[in-house]
């Protein structure tokens, strides 16, 4: 009815208590797996013991980390390439150790980054129609970590800026366009970093760490601006993400191993805004967040369900919406960016659930009778155009995401040409030499000019002397 469309509160009076029921347009969101022939079958999903999502999706491709003998690999499948995937299907296979995390660049649907046990980050340019032969040559290799790299995360609004976090407890922020490590955050994390996430405009990052602390970091000032020790008291891994309003949402475990969801205000991290207890289970809860609608989807690793919540600024702030349940546990999960959804079907989220040997898309839909575009479900969303260049961001500028309307569906833009321009060491030496020697050579030049002048003076005075002597000689000769 009307209430559910406006998201107002309605108060229901019981016999002797007041109960507040919040009506939300997302309350009736339901999940549905696609038909079998639209799944990707016969995939050997990676068995690596690292709690990453193992899958990343964009409007063109789904990429999945797979088992590989001797080295590491991931599959990149055009979305329409469902069905049985041949054993010989080419993979991206340039890493020398297992791949731990992958993420599509938000600004170019053919560029993907990978972090690996081989201590490197690699950046790959996928051909427009996917791979026809194995790809072992990345467009960029980012070397700087001394241990395996478990997290890669692209900057949301600056072109070619990538964050990586390694088991060396360091975060490196790269300019992918030049393959340079621009910022290294050392000595901030005393233990393994479990998650690292940018805020909406990429001015800050939030991390969760094995030491149980959540830290809000200004990466360009290289300072921790807020910190909560023991955000969750349990020993199992935590996750932390930024919400659109700047608050932080965390998942973790209580001392009694109950799974928790908590909300924090970075300007006062002492007390959580709210802590929500869920169940007792040991799978890490991976949060996927829709900044446009403020809906958070929690996918537990090893669970067979997706739970979703709406976050508002009304108490109790975190509002449970519903659970999508199934029989098979999930090994990993991909989450489609909003611009990849089918707005004509009122699809508000799509997941790519990894089973042991297949990937199954799950569509989340808001039931609506009308066939018209539902603007209330689709506020303008982040498009692929970056707001800034890498250099501008490293210089201190910020930019909010450039929004696009989904009213007529998403029309892919032509990708900007992706190029890595490595700084030529010889070039920089040549420039350095001329630059370095320029003040010196100026002084030297002046010295030489002085010397020439004094020589000239000497020559001309000698000349005068010779003339005088010649005159005297001629007089004598006469
Ligand atoms: C970026 O986000 C931060 C933190 O939310 C905010 O303080 C800042 O004003 C934003 N800057 C721009 C240019 O949007």
Image (cartoon, rainbow, N blue to C red):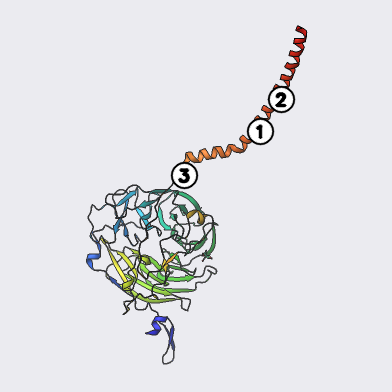
**Lower position in the chain sequence, tag 1 or tag 2:** 1
Q: In the rendered image, which quarter contains the C terminus?
A: top right
Task: Measure the alpha-carbon separation of dots 3 and 2.
Answer: 49 Å
At x 33%, y 53%, the residue is 126
Above-or-below relation of 257 to 51: below
x then y, percent, for residue 311: 44, 74
Quadrant of the rendering where the N terminus is positioned: bottom left
The alpha-carbon separation of the residues under discs 1 and 2 comes to 16 Å
Q: Is 358 located above or below residue 446 in the figure?
A: below
Question: Which quadrant would residue 253 be assigned to in this image?
Answer: bottom left
Q: Quadrant of residue 409?
A: bottom left
- The secondary element bearing badge 3 is classed as loop
Quarter-of-image position of residue 449: top right
Dot placed on the residue nearer the N-terminal end, 3 or 2: 3
Q: Nearer the viewer, residue 329 or 412?
A: 412
Task: Return the disc, 3 or 1, that comes first in the chain's sequence.
Answer: 3
The verdict on label 3 being within 8 Å of ligand 1 is no
3D distance between C-alphas at marks 3 and 1? 34 Å
Which mark is drawn over residue 457? 2
Which element carries disc 2, helix, strand or loop? Answer: helix
**Position of residue 407 measured from the top left corner of the image (x, y, whole percent):** 37, 71
Q: Residues within 10 Å of mark 2 (few under 14, many from 20)?
A: few
Residue 430 shown left or right of residue 29 in the figure:
right
Spot occupied by residue 160 in the image (x, y as percentages of width and height): 44, 54
**Pointer 1 residue:** 446
Nearer to the camera, 208 or 312: 312
Label 3 neighbourhood size at 10 Å, few (<14), some (14-19), many (20+)? few
Which is more foreground, mark 3 or mark 2?
2
Which residue: 39% across, 81% down? 5
Of labels 1 and 2, the one closer to you: 2
Q: Position of residue 102 (x, y in %)?
A: 37, 57
Residue under pointer 3: 423
């Amino acid at each position: 009815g009307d209430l559910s469309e406006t998201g107002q509160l309605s108060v229901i009076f019981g016999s002797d208590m007041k109960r507040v029921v919040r009506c939300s347009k997302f309350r009736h969101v339901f999940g549905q797996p696609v038909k079998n022939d639209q799944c990707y079958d016969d995939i050997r999903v990676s068995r690596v013991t690292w709690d990453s999502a193992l899958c990343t999706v964009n409007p063109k491709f789904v990429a999945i980390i797979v088992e590989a003998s001797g080295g590491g690999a991931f599959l990149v499948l055009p979305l329409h390439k469902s069905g049985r995937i041949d054993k010989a299907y080419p993979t991206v296979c340039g890493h020398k150790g297992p791949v731990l995390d992958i993420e599509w660049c938000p600004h170019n649907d053919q560029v993907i980054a990978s972090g690996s046990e081989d201590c490197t980050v690699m950046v790959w340019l996928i051909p427009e129609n996917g791979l026809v032969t194995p790809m072992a040559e990345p467009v960029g290799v980012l070397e700087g970590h001394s241990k395996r790299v478990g997290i890669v995360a692209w900057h949301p609004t600056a072109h070619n800026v990538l964050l990586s976090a390694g088991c060396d407890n360091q975060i490196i922020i790269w300019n992918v366009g030049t393959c340079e490590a621009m910022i290294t955050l050392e000595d901030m994390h005393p233990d393994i970093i479990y998650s690292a996430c940018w805020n909406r405009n990429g001015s800050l990052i939030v991390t969760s760490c094995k030491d149980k602390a959540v830290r809000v970091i200004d990466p360009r000032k290289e300072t921790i601006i807020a910190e909560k020790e023991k955000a969750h008291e349990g020993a199992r891994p935590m996750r932390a993400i930024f919400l659109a309003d700047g608050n932080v949402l965390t998942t973790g475990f209580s001392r009694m191993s109950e799974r928790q969801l908590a909300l924090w205000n970075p300007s006062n991290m002492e007390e959580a805004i709210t802590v929500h207890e869920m169940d007792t289970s040991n799978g890490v809860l991976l949060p996927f967040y829709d900044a446009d609608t403020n809906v958070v989807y929690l996918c537990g690793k090893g669970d067979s369900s997706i739970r979703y919540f709406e976050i508002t600024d009304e108490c109790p702030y975190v509002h449970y919406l519903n659970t999508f349940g199934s029989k098979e546990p999930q090994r990993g999960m991909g989450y489609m960016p909003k611009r990849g959804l089918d707005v004509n079907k009122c699809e508000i989220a799509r997941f790519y659930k990894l089973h042991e040997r297949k990937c199954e898309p799950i569509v989340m839909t808001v039931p609506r009778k009308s066939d018209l575009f539902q603007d209330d479900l689709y506020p303008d969303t982040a498009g692929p155009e970056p707001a800034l260049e890498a250099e501008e961001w490293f210089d201190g500028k910020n930019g909010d995401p450039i929004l696009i309307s989904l009213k007529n569906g998403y029309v892919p833009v032509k990708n900007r040409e992706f190029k890595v321009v490595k700084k030529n060491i010889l070039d920089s030496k040549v420039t350095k030499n001329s630059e370095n020697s320029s003040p010196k050579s100026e002084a030297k030049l002046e010295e030489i000019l002085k010397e020439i002048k004094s020589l000239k003076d000497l020559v001309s005075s000698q000349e005068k002397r010779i003339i005088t002597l010649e005159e005297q000689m001629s007089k004598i000769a006469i």
